C-alpha cells in the first residue's frame, strides 16, 4: 500500500498521484512521507496500489494472481480467450490494454508477458477509456505486474483434430525480467499447421454442380433441352445427362447410350483433391525493453517481426466445353455443352506469403501536475499471393471443334495455360499520439480531471495484380486529430457534498479529426456515473462517432474467380458464378449514435462477485458491410453487386464492402464474474509466515439478448429484420447468445472450461429450399493442467514443469441447418461450416 502526502498552496496548484499515469519517479516501496507537525498547510492523503486505474468506476471483473493461475493460461492470448466475453464491448470491439494503469504502444508490448508475471487483471467499462485519450466505446483491460520477476519459459505443444487432419505443432521460447520500473521481454515462436483434406470429413457432392471427371452434357442455354430426339426417346425433356462409362468410339455412340441416365447427372467427389483448411507455417519474434529515462521519465521500445506462408488447394479446375454437333464423337443433332472437371491436370491452388514488421515506443513523464505520454508506431506489411483460379481451355475447345475426342483425358499441352493472378500488396503506417492528463480545478465534490489528446497518422498501400485480371490500386491518406475529455464530480459522500445522492460525476469528450479524402469528422460523448451506495454503480452514456473506412475496405486487391459455387436464396440451389473480390474506393465514413445505460453490482464487500448489465441502443448511418447473402431483397436494394441473365440465373456476384443506409440495434449484455479461494484461511504453518495454500476458483457467464437489429440497405428500401429471418451473411443473427467460463486450481493442478452458446434462428426464403432453420449450438472447451513436481517432489528436473491437455469443442458440436423440407443444403453441411470440429492439444512447459 502506497501513501503519498500531497501539499498545495492557497492558489490550488496540486501534484497528485491519483491520475491515470502515475509519476515515473514514484517508488511504491518507499517509506510513506510524514507531514511535519508544525506545517500549517492543508494536506490530503491519497491511498492506492501500484498500477491500479484511478477511477471511481467499479471494474466489471477482477482476477488476482490466484484466479489467473486457476485459468491454466500459459500466455496472455490464452488468458484473454478465457475471459473474452467480459472484455469485448457491447458492439464487439476489442478492448484497450494498459500495463500498470499506463498506455502501451500496442498489444505487441504486453502480448508475450507470461501469466506468472501478472499480479492482477482489471476489466473496466467503456467510460474509463476517456481517461486514456480514447472514446468511450471500448473496455479497458489493465494488467498489473509483479514488482520483481524473472523467468525463462520453454513450451512445446502438439495437437490434432480427433477425426484426423489439421495436425499442428508450436514451439515457444520466451524470457521475461521485471525489476522495479525496468522490463525486458524476448520471445520466439514457430508454428506449423497441416492442411485438412476434405476426404477427412463427410461432405457430399453438390447436386447442383454439373461437373464430373468424365463429364455431364447440358444444353447450350441454362436449363435448356439437350436434343429433342433424346427427349422423345426418354419420354421427358432432358436437360442434363452423364457421359456413359467406358470408351466411346467414332460412329458407335448413339443416343440410346445416354438415355439410360437422362436427367440423372453423375456427381463427382472432390474430397481427395480439395482442402477445407489451409496449411500454414508462421515464425514470430519479439523484443520489448522498458525502463526509466532520467529521473522524471520512463519509456519502452517494442520490435516485432512475423512471416507466414499459407497454402490452399481448391480442387480440379472446372471447364465448360462447346461440343458441336459435327464432332464425330457426338450423337447429338445440335451443339451441346460438356461440363468436366480436368482431373488430368494438377489441381488449382493458392499460396500467400505475409511479412509483417512493427516498431512501437512510449515515453511518459510528469510536469507541473500533468501526467503525459507520447506513443509512436511504425508498421509495414508485404503480402505476396499467387492463386491459380482456372485453366485456359481455348486450345482444348479448338481441338474439340476440329474433331478431337472430348471424352478422353486431354493432352497436357492443351491445358498448359493456367489463369493465374499474382497479387503483391505493400502497406505501411506511421502514427504518433500525445496524451496529457491533469486535475487543474477543484469543485466542491472533488477535482476535475482533464485529458487532452493530439495524434497524427499516415498510412498507405500499393496493391497490384498481374495475370488473368490485372489491376492496380495505390492509396494513401493522413489523419490529424485532437480531443479533449472532462470528468466533473457533482456529488460526493466522501467530500460531504450532497451526501444523500452518493458519488455522482459527469463526463464529456469531443474530438475532431481531418482524414484525407473524407474531410472533417467528429466524435462526442456525454455520460453520467452514479454510485448511490457502496456496491452499486450506474452508468449512462450518449455517444456520436464518425469513422473512415479502413485501408483494406478501400483498397483491397481486386480478384475475380470463375465458376464459384454459391447458394442462391432466390432458388434455394447452388449456382455457378464469376466472383469478384476486393476493396471499394467509393466508401463513405460510417456514422454511429449510441445510447447506453448500465449497472454494476458488487453485493458483498469481501467477495469478488460482480454482476453487470448494459443496455445499448445504436443507430448506424452509412454502415460499412460486406453482403454475402444472395437474396431477392438484397439484389433489389444493391443491384450493382449482382448480375443475372435473361433467364434469371446468376452470372456474377461482387463481395465488396458497401455503405448501407441505416441500421438500428437494441442489445442487453449481462455479465456475472466471481473469483476467490475455497475453504477458510488457516494460520501460517511455515517459518516464512505464509498461510497454507487453498484451492482457487474463477468463473463467469455473459448472456446477450438482442431485442432489435433492423437494417435498410438504401434510402426508400424496406427494412430488413435480421432477428426475424432476413440475412446479410447467409447465416443468422441470434436473438439469444451467451458465454461462460470457469476454473479451479490447487498447487499448480487444475481444470478449466469455457463455452459459447446460441439460440435457434430462422432465415426466411422465397422458396422452401431457401427457408433455413438453424438449430441451437453450444461449443464447450475443456483443459486440465498438472504440475509434474507435485507428483514427483524429490526430482529436481520436475521443478516448474507443467503438463496441459486442451480439448476444444469437446462434444464435436456443429451448426445444424435444414430447409423447410428437412434437407441439408450443400453449402450448409456441418463439415463445411466447421471443418476442424473437436481438437486436442498436448503441451509441456518448463520454467527456469
Image (spheres, helix red, strand yellow):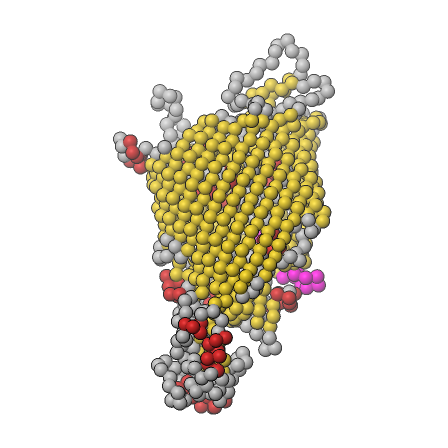
Residue 476 vs residue 524, the one in the foreground = 476
Residue at position x 70%, y 45% from top?
514
User: Looking at the picture, does residue 374 appear above or below residue 737?
Assistant: above
Residue at position x 39%, y 76% from top?
409
Q: Position of residue 122 (x, y in %)?
A: 53, 36
Residue at position x 61%, y 41% from top?
431
Residue 603 vs residue 719, the one in the foreground = 719
In the drawing, does residue 749 fall left or right of residue 761?
Answer: left
Q: Position of residue 294 (x, y in %)?
A: 56, 24
Residue segment shown in magenta: 705-720
Outermost residue to the top: 38
Residue 226 vs residue 140, the one in the foreground = 226
Q: Quadrant of the C terminus?
A: top left
Outermost residue to the front: 413
- Magenta segment: does it hold 731? no
Q: How many marks?
A: 0
Q: Position of residue 717 (x, y in %)?
A: 68, 64
Residue 616 vs residue 132, the one in the foreground = 132
Occupied quadrant, residue 360? top right
In the drawing, does residue 489 fall left or right of residue 690?
Answer: right
Q: Position of residue 147 (x, y in %)?
A: 47, 27
Does residue 263 show up?
Answer: no
Residue at position x 42%, y 41% from top?
188
In the drawing, does residue 556 fall left or right of residue 202?
Answer: right
Does residue 349 show up?
Answer: yes
User: Looking at the picture, does residue 151 appear above or below residue 730?
Assistant: above
User: Looking at the picture, does residue 515 appear above or below residue 149?
Assistant: below
- Magenta segment: does it hold 706? yes
Amino acid at each position: 500500500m502506497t501513501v503519498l502526502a500531497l501539499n498545495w498552496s492557497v492558489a490550488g496548484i496540486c501534484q497528485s498521484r491519483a491520475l491515470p499515469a502515475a509519476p515515473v519517479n514514484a517508488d511504491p516501496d518507499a517509506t510513506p512521507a510524514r507531514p511535519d507537525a508544525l506545517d500549517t498547510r492543508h494536506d490530503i492523503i491519497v491511498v492506492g496500489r501500484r498500477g491500479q486505474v484511478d477511477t471511481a468506476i467499479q471494474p466489471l471483473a477482477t482476477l488476482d494472481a490466484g484466479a489467473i493461475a486457476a485459468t491454466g493460461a500459459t500466455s496472455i492470448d490464452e488468458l484473454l480467450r478465457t475471459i473474452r466475453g467480459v472484455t469485448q464491448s457491447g458492439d464487439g470491439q476489442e478492448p484497450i490494454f494498459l500495463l500498470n494503469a499506463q498506455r502501451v504502444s500496442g498489444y505487441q508490448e504486453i502480448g508475450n508477458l507470461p501469466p506468472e508475471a501478472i499480479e492482477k487483471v482489471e476489466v473496466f467499462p467503456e467510460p474509463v477509456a476517456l481517461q486514456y485519450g480514447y472514446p468511450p466505446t471500448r473496455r479497458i483491460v489493465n494488467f498489473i505486474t509483479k514488482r520483481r520477476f524473472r523467468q525463462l519459459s520453454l513450451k512445446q505443444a502438439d495437437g490434432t483434430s480427433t477425426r484426423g487432419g489439421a495436425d499442428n505443432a508450436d514451439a515457444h521460447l520466451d524470457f521475461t525480467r521485471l525489476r522495479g520500473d525496468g522490463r525486458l521481454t524476448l520471445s520466439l515462436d514457430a508454428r506449423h499447421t497441416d492442411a485438412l483434406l476434405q476426404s477427412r470429413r463427410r461432405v457430399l457432392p453438390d447436386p447442383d454442380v454439373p461437373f464430373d471427371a468424365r463429364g455431364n452434357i447440358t444444353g447450350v442455354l441454362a436449363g435448356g433441352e439437350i436434343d429433342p430426339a433424346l427427349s422423345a426417346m426418354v419420354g421427358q425433356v432432358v436437360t442434363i445427362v452423364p457421359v456413359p462409362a467406358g470408351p466411346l468410339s467414332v460412329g458407335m455412340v448413339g443416343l440410346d447410350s445416354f438415355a439410360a441416365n437422362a436427367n440423372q447427372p453423375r456427381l463427382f467427389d472432390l474430397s481427395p483433391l480439395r482442402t477445407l483448411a489451409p496449411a500454414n507455417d508462421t515464425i514470430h519474434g519479439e523484443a520489448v525493453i522498458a525502463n526509466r529515462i532520467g529521473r522524471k521519465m520512463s519509456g519502452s521500445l517494442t520490435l516485432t517481426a512475423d512471416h507466414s506462408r499459407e497454402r490452399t488447394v481448391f480442387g480440379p479446375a472446372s471447364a465448360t466445353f462447346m461440343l458441336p454437333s459435327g464432332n464425330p464423337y457426338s450423337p447429338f443433332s445440335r451443339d451441346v455443352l460438356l461440363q468436366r472437371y480436368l482431373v488430368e491436370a494438377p489441381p488449382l491452388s493458392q499460396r500467400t506469403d505475409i511479412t509483417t514488421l512493427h516498431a512501437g515506443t512510449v515515453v511518459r513523464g510528469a510536469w507541473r501536475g500533468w501526467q503525459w505520454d507520447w506513443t509512436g508506431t511504425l508498421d509495414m506489411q508485404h503480402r505476396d499471393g499467387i492463386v491459380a483460379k482456372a485453366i485456359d481451355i481455348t486450345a482444348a475447345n479448338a481441338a474439340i471443334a476440329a474433331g478431337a475426342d472430348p471424352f478422353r483425358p486431354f493432352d497436357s499441352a492443351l491445358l498448359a495455360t493456367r489463369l493465374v493472378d499474382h497479387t503483391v500488396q505493400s502497406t505501411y503506417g506511421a502514427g504518433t499520439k500525445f496524451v496529457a492528463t491533469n486535475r487543474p480545478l477543484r469543485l466542491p465534490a472533488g477535482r476535475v480531471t482533464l485529458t487532452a489528446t493530439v495524434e497524427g497518422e499516415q498510412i498507405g498501400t500499393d496493391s497490384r495484380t498481374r495475370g488473368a485480371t490485372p489491376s492496380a490500386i495505390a492509396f494513401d491518406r493522413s489523419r490529424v486529430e485532437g480531443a479533449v475529455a472532462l470528468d466533473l464530480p457533482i456529488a460526493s459522500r466522501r467530500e460531504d457534498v450532497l451526501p444523500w445522492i452518493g458519488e455522482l460525476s459527469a463526463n464529456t469528450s469531443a474530438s475532431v479529426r481531418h482524414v484525407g479524402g473524407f474531410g472533417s469528422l467528429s466524435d462526442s460523448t456525454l455520460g453520467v456515473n452514479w454510485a448511490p451506495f457502496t456496491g452499486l454503480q450506474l452508468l449512462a452514456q450518449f455517444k456520436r462517432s464518425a469513422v473512415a473506412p479502413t485501408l483494406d475496405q478501400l483498397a483491397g486487391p481486386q480478384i475475380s474467380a470463375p465458376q464459384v459455387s454459391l447458394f442462391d436464396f432466390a432458388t434455394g440451389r447452388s449456382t455457378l458464378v464469376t466472383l469478384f473480390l476486393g476493396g471499394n474506393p467509393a466508401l463513405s465514413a460510417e456514422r454511429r449514435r449510441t445510447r447506453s445505460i448500465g449497472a454494476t453490482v458488487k453485493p458483498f464487500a469481501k467477495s469478488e462477485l460482480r454482476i453487470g448489465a448494459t443496455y445499448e441502443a445504436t443507430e448506424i448511418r452509412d454502415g460499412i458491410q460486406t453482403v454475402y447473402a444472395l437474396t431477392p431483397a438484397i439484389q433489389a436494394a444493391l443491384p450493382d453487386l449482382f448480375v443475372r441473365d435473361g433467364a434469371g440465373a446468376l452470372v456474377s456476384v461482387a463481395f465488396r464492402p458497401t455503405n448501407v443506409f441505416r441500421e438500428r440495434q437494441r442489445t442487453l449484455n449481462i455479465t456475472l464474474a466471481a473469483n476467490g479461494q475455497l475453504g477458510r484461511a488457516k494460520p501460517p504453518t511455515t517459518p516464512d509466515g505464509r498461510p497454507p495454500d487453498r484451492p482457487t476458483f474463477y468463473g463467469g457467464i455473459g448472456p446477450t439478448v438482442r431485442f432489435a437489429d433492423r437494417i435498410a440497405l438504401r434510402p426508400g428500401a424496406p427494412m430488413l429484420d435480421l432477428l426475424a429471418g432476413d440475412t446479410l451473411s447467409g447465416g443468422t443473427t441470434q436473438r439469444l447468445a451467451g458465454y461462460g467460463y470457469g476454473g479451479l486450481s490447487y498447487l499448480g493442478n487444475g481444470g478449466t472450461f469455457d463455452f459459447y452458446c446460441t439460440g435457434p434462428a430462422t432465415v426466411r426464403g422465397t422458396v422452401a429450399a431457401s427457408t433455413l432453420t438453424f438449430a441451437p449450438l453450444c461449443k464447450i472447451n475443456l483443459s486440465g493442467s498438472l504440475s509434474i513436481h507435485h507428483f514427483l517432489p524429490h526430482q529436481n528436473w520436475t521443478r516448474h514443469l507443467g503438463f496441459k491437455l486442451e480439448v476444444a469443442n469437446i462434444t464435436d458440436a456443429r451448426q445444424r441447418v435444414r430447409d423447410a423440407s428437412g434437407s441439408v443444403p450443400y453449402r450448409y453441411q456441418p463439415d463445411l461450416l466447421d471443418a476442424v470440429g473437436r481438437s486436442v492439444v498436448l503441451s509441456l512447459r518448463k520454467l527456469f
